[in-house]
Image (cartoon, grey):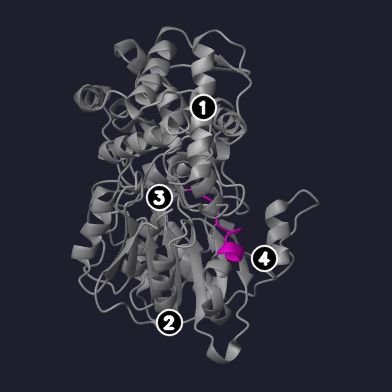
């Protein structure tokens, strides 16, 4: 197994990254940390249904002549660069400081249709280029989520870039309402809305009630800003950042949901991108609040791969000596949790939560991630026998994310973006029918990926989703077994963008590749593109490293 770096991209339902790493629908930690340690309720990003763009005043402003720029005061603002260290316990700030980064707050309008109205701030970090004679420009980062923080990512991205990193200002951005930017918090009792639907109608109805409660809390505590928590507004913020940095164009590295943000930015602001890398690709025709649908086969494949790994280590984890025995142990845990919630530390884990723990444990294909999941399943299995269980560190963090309000802000922002970007069906009966059909194909993951969420109880989006541009010369990166942003997504975008190129990591059940998984082939291909600005002549396939 190849070990990935200490952080990773984010995904819906995953715990926020504590150091840098990409995220996808699950809870997330910073990009590389998220990928490697996969803290909390993992999920994926591929939402469905792109419609046409509404010609709002803000959209008109994006193409208006510079002489009539209603955003001039934002574009020309002076950035006050300062230390990123917020205090003695600020690990992210310390890592940024050690890497020579500085931080600043960028002022942007809450509502781009009213640029003279209320403002908010977007926090950014920057490691400046040292090879100024060959400087390319600014490289903006987004590690996914949606809602994942990215301000801490420049140090590890700069390392992954090797020598070419010296030619870029590497810029981390906490998108609006995320991390160090103006905050948003709906005061949830959980960090993620994602739950399994249970085994019967009563269980499903409990998840309906939870989804309605979470939506209601957001309406109560943050109703005035919810209409402006969208990908399109995040893209507008990116362009303000571009201008405030003094750049005519920006390069971009986006992971997971960040690949969709990159597509939206390149569509809304044509001609303002230079070199674009999208890793863990979201297909725009699949982007909507029900983004997890269709990931069941990839997650089942990843579960089988993990089960084989655990079986080979039965003396350590005691889950079974064959893949089949380990999978049977997983099914046994889920069945037991359906009869009586499992007591694990201070938490009660029922059959709505067991699949989320498993789902979150399957985004990273390396020994460390597999060991975390094996320890978690071992702990849950011991609890089925009535033993007193102190959870392993990863399981404790995951359950804390799912069952306390410690990460309420993360789940709040993630959900607000998803619901603000596109509508979801409003009738619970639609979800119940879908859950029942999906359960027949995959009893463990189907009731997760098709279940109801707060968007069923959300106000309609203020704008319609972006119709993504027809072509862009970008470098796409995806693993064949990615259980979050499935490989088919990357193939879809590759066909949509004939001038792009696709780097495929073959044989890995891995979410996010560049700088995370440890593929010298994939990393070198990305770095060559960042160095030269020239895409490979053809698509590139990298085999999983042996050993």
Residue at 47% from the left image edge and 34% from the top image edge: 41
Disc 1 element: helix
Q: Residues within 10 Å of mark 3 (few under 14, many from 20)?
A: many
Q: Earlier in the sequence, mark 4 or mark 1?
A: 4
Q: Nearer the viewer, mark 4 or mark 2?
A: 4
Q: Earlier in the sequence, mark 4 or mark 2?
A: 2
Task: Give the residue at x 30% y 25%.
Answer: 447
Question: How far apart are labels 4 and 3 at the CA level?
Answer: 28 Å
Q: Is residue 443 magenta?
A: no
Label number found at residue 511 = 3
- 160 in relation to 280, above or below: below
Q: Earlier in the sequence, mark 1 or mark 2?
A: 2
- Give the quarter of the image for residue 521: bottom left
Magenta span of residues: 147-156
Label 4 to label 2: alpha-carbon separation: 28 Å
Mark 4 or 3 closer to N-term?
4
Disc 4 designates what residue?
A: 103
Q: Which residue is mark 1?
A: 315
Residue 103 image offset from top left, x and y in percent = 67, 65
Q: 475 or 232: nearer the eye?
A: 475
User: How many numbered circles does the render carry?
Assistant: 4
Q: CA distance from mark 4 to mark 1?
A: 48 Å
Residue picked out by circle 2? 66
CA gap, disc 1 and disc 3: 29 Å
Please say if the residues under marks 4 and 3 sit with CB atoms less than 8 Å apart.
no
Is 18 rendered above or below residue 434? below
Q: Secondary structure at mark 2?
A: helix
């Amino acid at each position: 197994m190849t070990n990935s770096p200490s952080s990773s991209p984010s995904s819906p339902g995953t715990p926020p990254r504590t150091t840098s790493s990409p995220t996808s629908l699950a809870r997330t930690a910073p990009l590389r940390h998220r990928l490697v340690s996969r803290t909390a309720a993992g999920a994926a990003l591929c939402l469905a249904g792109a419609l046409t763009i509404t010609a709002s005043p803000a959209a008109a402003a994006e193409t208006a002549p510079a002489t009539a720029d209603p955003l001039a005061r934002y574009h020309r603002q002076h950035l006050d660069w300062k230390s990123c260290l917020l205090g003695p316990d600020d690990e992210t700030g310390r890592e940024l400081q050690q890497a020579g980064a500085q931080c600043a707050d960028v002022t942007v309008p809450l509502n781009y249709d009213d640029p003279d109205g209320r403002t908010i701030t977007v926090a950014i970090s920057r490691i400046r280029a040292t090879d100024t004679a060959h400087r390319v420009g600014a490289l903006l980062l987004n590690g996914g989520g949606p809602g994942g923080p990215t301000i801490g990512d420049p140090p590890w991205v700069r390392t992954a870039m090797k020598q070419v990193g010296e030619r870029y200002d590497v810029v981390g951005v906490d998108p609006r309402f995320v991390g160090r930017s103006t905050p948003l918090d709906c005061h949830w009792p959980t960090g993620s809305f994602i739950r399994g639907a249970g085994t019967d109608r009563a269980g499903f109805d409990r998840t309906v009630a939870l989804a309605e409660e979470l939506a209601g809390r957001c309406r109560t505590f943050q109703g005035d800003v919810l209409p402006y928590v969208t990908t399109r507004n995040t893209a507008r913020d990116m362009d303000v950042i571009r201008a405030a940095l003094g750049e005519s164009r920006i390069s971009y590295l986006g992971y997971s949901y960040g690949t969709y943000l990159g597509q939206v930015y390149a569509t809304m602001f044509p001609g303002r991108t230079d070199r674009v890398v999208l890793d863990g690709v979201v297909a725009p025709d699949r982007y909507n609040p029900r983004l997890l649908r269709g990931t069941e086969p990839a997650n089942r494949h990843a579960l089988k791969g993990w089960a084989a790994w655990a079986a080979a280590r039965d003396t350590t984890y005691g889950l079974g000596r064959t893949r089949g025995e380990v999978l049977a142990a997983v099914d046994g845990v889920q069945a037991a949790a359906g009869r009586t919630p499992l007591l694990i530390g201070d938490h009660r884990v029922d059959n709505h939560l067991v699949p989320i723990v498993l789902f979150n444990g399957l985004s990273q294909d390396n020994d460390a991630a597999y060991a975390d999941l094996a320890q978690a399943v071992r702990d849950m299995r011991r609890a089925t026998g009535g033993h007193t269980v102190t959870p392993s560190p990863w399981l404790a963090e995951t359950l804390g994310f799912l069952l306390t309000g410690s990460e309420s802000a993360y789940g709040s922002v993630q959900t607000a973006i998803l619901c603000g970007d596109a509508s979801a069906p409003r009738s619970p009966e639609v979800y119940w029918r879908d859950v029942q059909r999906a359960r027949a194909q995959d009893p463990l993951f189907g009731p997760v990926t098709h279940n109801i969420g707060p968007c069923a109880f959300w106000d309609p989006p203020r704008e319609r989703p972006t119709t993504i541009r027809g072509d862009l010369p970008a470098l796409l990166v995806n693993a064949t077994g990615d259980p979050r942003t499935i490989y088919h997504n990357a193939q879809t975008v590759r066909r949509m963008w004939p001038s792009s190129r696709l780097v495929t990591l073959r044989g890995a059940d891995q979410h996010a590749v560049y700088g995370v998984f440890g593929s010298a082939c994939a990393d070198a291909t990305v770095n060559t593109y960042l160095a030269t600005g020239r895409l490979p002549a053809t698509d590139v396939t990298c085999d999983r490293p042996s050993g």
